[in-house]
Amino acid sequence: MSKVNLEDIVSLCKRRGFIFQGSEVYGGLAGTWDYGPLGVALKRNIMSLWWKMFVEDADNMFGVDAAILMNAKVWKASGHVDTFTDPLVECSNCHARHRADKIDTSKCPTCGKSGTFGEPRQFNMMLKTYVGPVEDESAVTYLRPETAQGIFTNFKNVVDTLYPDVPFGIAQQGKAFRNEISPRDFVFRSREFEQMEVEYFVHPDHWEEAFEDWRKCVHEWFKAIGLPESMVHELEVEAKDRAHYSKRTIDFEFDFPHGRDELLGMAYRTDFDLQNIQRVSGKNMEYRPKDGSAPYVPHVIEPSFGVERAIMAVLTAAYSEDEVNGEKRVFLKLPAHLAPVKVAVLPLVKNKPELVAKAQEIYKTLKSCPLYSGAVMWVDTGNIGKNYRKMDEIGVPYCVTIDFQTLEDDTVTVRNRDTTKQERVSIDTLKKALSI
Ligand code: ATP
């Protein structure tokens, strides 16, 4: 288990504008979360890095952005209507509902009474909705529980428009919805969340190599988002615990504050989905190799990344405490490329126009510098010591302070978040001192 407390992360996220309870002013809506100014920046940095690594920098990967609402036949054909369920138990004493596979069912975790649970029943986790003005059975569809189906249904479109050679992958990022029985552990188990998925299409004879390659890519991803290898664990999922579509699954687990749990999953989905689409839609899903060899329905390796769990892992790995000048300090040791704010600019006083003008000049120069992507913050309220602490808490790698000496010799103070060391540098060499 991680040494970090979940409460510390939740409270920092709320206090500093990363993540708030969804619909908080109305008492909240369980399993939903809103991202504040810093949270949205962190989330976008993670998602953009993923897109760059797995789509833009790859030679055989294609992106799509499919609709969240899909024809209900998609969910019938994929098996989600019949089998996308979790076992639900209800306490006969307090009527609390729990996921049977996540608790010790001999005793109700809500009221503490023993022997109050009956046999579990299967509860479908898809959120149902109606499309169009008539609320009858023909208008029923579901908010997608995974982004994967938007990829499979576009397999033919990508093949027919871009003629890729197998192996190739299609990637998508976007919202997914699951009516989780008990959302918990902050954003870890939400009812609305975001996924980043790849369906990697291979010849059936080559799935094992592709699986191995993707396993390595997943570890590269962990490195890129700053997760220590020692906190990541692979779990080979037994057949009885695998999703209905998978012949092999590895769960990549992480030492979250609430314990070791799934960060992302990687599955060998065989040709399960394309065959289902072929059967239900009547459209041919075969791939025709350009060398004239026999057509076949490709098999699929699917690494499925959850954004919320990545955010939680990044925050857990980054959350640090130390002591500076006899006082406890909390800081987020975020990798600079993920930090929502890369540089903070602090004028030492607010009431000296010359000094403020100089600081504004520096702020504007840094703000427009592509290196920092606009992630530069102007901070002119409160005292300097407190401001440094605030910037540490939101993970700002560098603070630049403009003081009276700046007006005399064009130098500023650069403070490093991790070491708290301050260095006097000339404005000419500032960008070098702030290299991220
Ligand atoms: P779990 O066993 O924890 O319910 P799962 O095995 O059902 O997860 P998958 O269907 O493999 O999850 O989904 C792929 C990824 O999507 C997960 O590894 C996770 O990162 C993310 N994910 C799934 N469900 C949720 C959720 N309720 N909240 C946040 N992220 C989720």
Image (cartoon, helix red, strand yellow):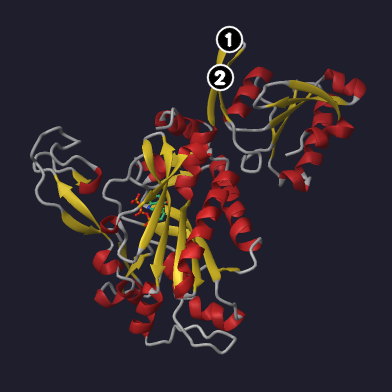
Mark 2: secondary structure: strand
Mark 1: secondary structure: loop
Q: Position of residue 403 (x, y in %)?
A: 81, 21
Nearer to us in this view, 29 or 153:
153
Q: Position of residue 171 (x, y in %)?
A: 53, 65
Looking at the figure, which quarter contains the N terminus?
top left
For residue 326, the mark is: 1
Residue 349 higher or lower than 151, as above or below = above
Residue 203 higher or lower than 125, as above or below = below
Q: Position of residue 251 (x, y in %)?
A: 40, 51
Does residue 18 appear anywhere in the picture?
A: no
For residue 35, the mark is: none
Residue 281 higher or lower than 63, as above or below = below
**Badge 2 residue CB within 8 Å of ligand 1:** no
Q: Position of residue 87 (x, y in %)?
A: 21, 53
Nearer to us in this view, 272 or 307:
272
Query: Which kind of residue does numbered mark 1 sit on?
Result: Gly
For residue 322, the mark is: 2
Nearer to us in this view, 267 or 321:
267
| Circle 2/circle 1 CB separation < 8 Å | no
**Residue at x 38% of width, y 64% of height:** 144
**Residue at x 58% of width, y 44% of height:** 223
Looking at the figure, which quarter contains the C terminus?
top right
